[in-house]
Amino acid sequence: MSQPDRSTARRLAAESLAQGDPTGWFDKLYIHAEGDASRIPWADRCVNPHLAAWLAKRGSEAQGQRALVVGCGLGDDAEALAALGYRVTAFDVSNAAVAWCRQRFSASQVDYCVADLLKLPEAWTSAFAFVVEIYTLQVLPVELRPVAMAQLARTVAPGGTLLVVARGRGAEEDRGTMPWPLERDEIDGFHRLGLQTASFEEFLDEEIPPVRRYRVELRRAT
């Protein structure tokens, strides 16, 4: 599987960052796609394989529990969780992305909504048994990640789980271009926010060339 074209996303991200708006480019990208999912670099129109593999290994423990999908994109991960029996809230900062989800899954039980990871609703505090964050932290500038991580952590209910999937890199390696990989120490920052690592996986994916990924399960004590 070859890597998708990220040139437009990188251009729009650079323009937004230059304007002091680190998340505004997401909506611009979805609008620019004009309904063509192939123009969204992370939109495979199926559940993320790293989430699917984790769910298959773990088994479903949904039982009507509340789940939150961060940066839901076109909604495939949210729909997969709903099919397992979770009561799913899925959000994206892009109005266009949320509208696209609602159009794709018009009969869905998922609550699709617009929200900003840097300032989530207070009502979501300790509200979710399972929170899924895939590829969102890695597209935020490093100085904004602590804010985003704090917002993520506070949504996890006592006894709940946060699953993070992201590109990874060593401290000595160059950050490269967006998406910017995370260091292990950044992930460990969740420990200061009341979460503890239950499992940490580092692996190469099937892209060409392969990309180093982290898949991390973090839990809040009961």
Image (cartoon, rainbow, N blue to C red):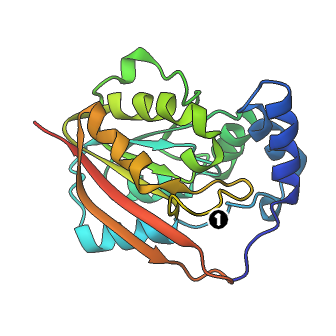
Seen in the image, is 159 located left or right of residue 8?
A: left
Front one among 38 and 201: 201
Looking at the image, which residue sits at the far front? 172
Which image quarter holds the N terminus?
A: bottom right
Residue 207 can be seen, yes or no: yes
Q: Residue at x 30, y 28 (%)?
A: 127
Q: Position of residue 109 (x, y in %)?
A: 46, 43
Image quadrant in which you'd find residue 29? top right
Which image quarter holds the C terminus?
A: top left
Seen in the image, is 213 located left or right of residue 101?
A: left
Looking at the image, which residue sits at the far left? 222
Q: Position of residue 142 (x, y in %)?
A: 59, 40
Image height of 77 relative to 93, above or below: below
Residue placed under numbered mark 1 in the picture: 45
Q: Position of residue 216 (x, y in %)?
A: 35, 58
Secondary structure of the residue carrying numbered label 1: loop
Image quadrant in which you'd find residue 160? top left
Neighbour tally class for label 1: few under 14, some 14-19, many 20 plus, Cα within 10 Å = few
Front one among 176 and 153: 176
Seen in the image, is 155 located left or right of residue 33?
A: left
- Mark count: 1
Residue 34 can be seen, yes or no: no
Q: Amino acid at mark 1?
A: Arg
Q: Position of residue 184 (x, y in %)?
A: 41, 56
Q: Residue at x 51, y 58 (%)?
A: 171
Image quadrant in which you'd find residue 56? bottom left
